[in-house]
Image: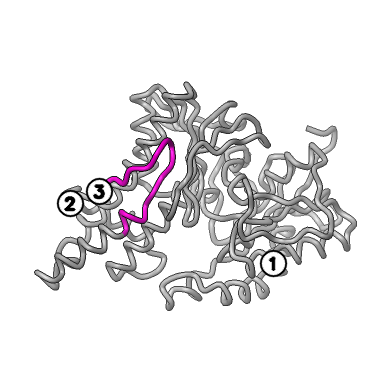
Amino acid sequence: MTDKPVFILGIESSCDETSAAVLKDTQLLSNIVATQDTIHRFYGGVVPELASRAHQQKIIPVVAEALNRANITKNDLHAVAFTRGPGLMGALLVGVSFAKSFAQALELPLIEVNHMQGHILAHFITQERAAGGSGSRQSQSSNQKPNSKGGNPQPDHQGPRFPFLCLTVSGGHTQIVLVKDHLDMEILGETKDDAAGEAFDKAAKIMGLPYPGGILIDRLSKEGKVVFKFPHPQSPGYHFSFSGLKTAFLNFINENTAKDPGFIEKNKADICASYQKTIVDILMHKLVQASRDTGVKEIAISGGVSANSGLRNELLDTGKKNGWNTYIAPLSLCTDNAAMIAIAGYYKYLKKDFADQHITPLARMPF
């Protein structure tokens, strides 16, 4: 760390969340998230053009609120970090353009961040109980490290110890990453087609559940039992594949509703529990394999799907069986948010890893 506190403004606009956050070194001062669920619900998924328009409307008030909640002014900032990619091009363009203009006007360093690396580094954000609010998604207290031997989670202000494995799961990505340092990461395996989050959302849509459906599958699964069997697609090494599972689920629903039009409604909770368990088992099988092969027992999960209760519980159970130290970020830091962009920006600031005004967004950004 530097002798004096470093204040970083983070900007996130990769998909359908407009977010701004302020960090004082690693301490979270504010994390404002403006969601677009009501805009996209009618269409059953994110509409890129509508998402970018909503970002344009919300970016300025969200940044203003983040500074206000942090109780600082724009002149106190040391740098502006922003999501360069991956994500929706139009949505990214709004955040990147704002960050460039804001930084140029204040003569501040500009820091580009890979969205997926931000998810991983969210584990290193520290939070005070009285920290500034996080808008529609209120922050919890300090980071929690679930004890792999059972008991209550213990406060952990340092994050996982290096090296650690991070299962990063979201609507667009599924990866197992070997994290050697804050800015030194290696992808060991990733999805070769659809992501786990996509598999959840498409299954929900097939069942006629409203958007966002992945959350509803998790909620309904708590009321059901695992009574249906779905295939576990095979993929080499630590890689994943979920497109075949989606097809199998569609065929399963079509075949059963042809016999009984009320099949989904009668078995909704059991279908959700069975399908969720299948995805979680696929994820954990690869994670266990990676841990055994590398010998790494520091294990974390991140990304929007890491908010899934079935995945979180299975990680803790598997951690107990395998002697892992397991790390799960607070729910407010799992889904897309600017705090994770700011923490990545903080570590890049310490290395003086700055971008220039010629930088452009990347829908597909190399890790």
Q: Earlier in the sequence, mark 3 or mark 1?
A: 1
Give the CA distance from mark 2 to mark 3: 10 Å
The answer to whether mark 3 and mark 1 are in CB contact below 8 A is no
Main structural element of the magenta stretch: helix, strand or loop? Answer: loop
Q: Is residue 326 above or below residue 208?
A: above
The answer to whether mark 2 and mark 3 are in CB contact below 8 A is no
For the residue labelled by badge 3, is the local secondary structure a helix, a strand or a loop?
A: loop
For the residue labelled by badge 2, is the local secondary structure a helix, a strand or a loop?
A: loop
* Occupied quadrant, residue 21: bottom right
Left or right, 66 with reference to 307: right
The residue range painted magenta reads: 232-246
Q: Nearer the viewer, residue 16 or 331?
A: 16
The answer to whether mark 1 and mark 2 are in CB contact below 8 A is no
Q: Which mark is residue 169?
A: none
Kind of residue at badge 2: Phe
Q: Is residue 186 above or below residue 30?
A: above
* Occupied quadrant, residue 122: top right
* Occupied quadrant, residue 2: top right
Q: Is residue 187 above or below residue 360?
A: above
Kind of residue at badge 1: Leu
Name the front one of labels 3 and 1. 3
Name the front one of labels 2 and 3. 3
Please give the residue where the numbered disc 2 appears in the rendered image. Answer: 228
Q: Earlier in the sequence, mark 1 or mark 2?
A: 1
Please give the residue where the numbered disc 3 appears in the rendered image. Answer: 231
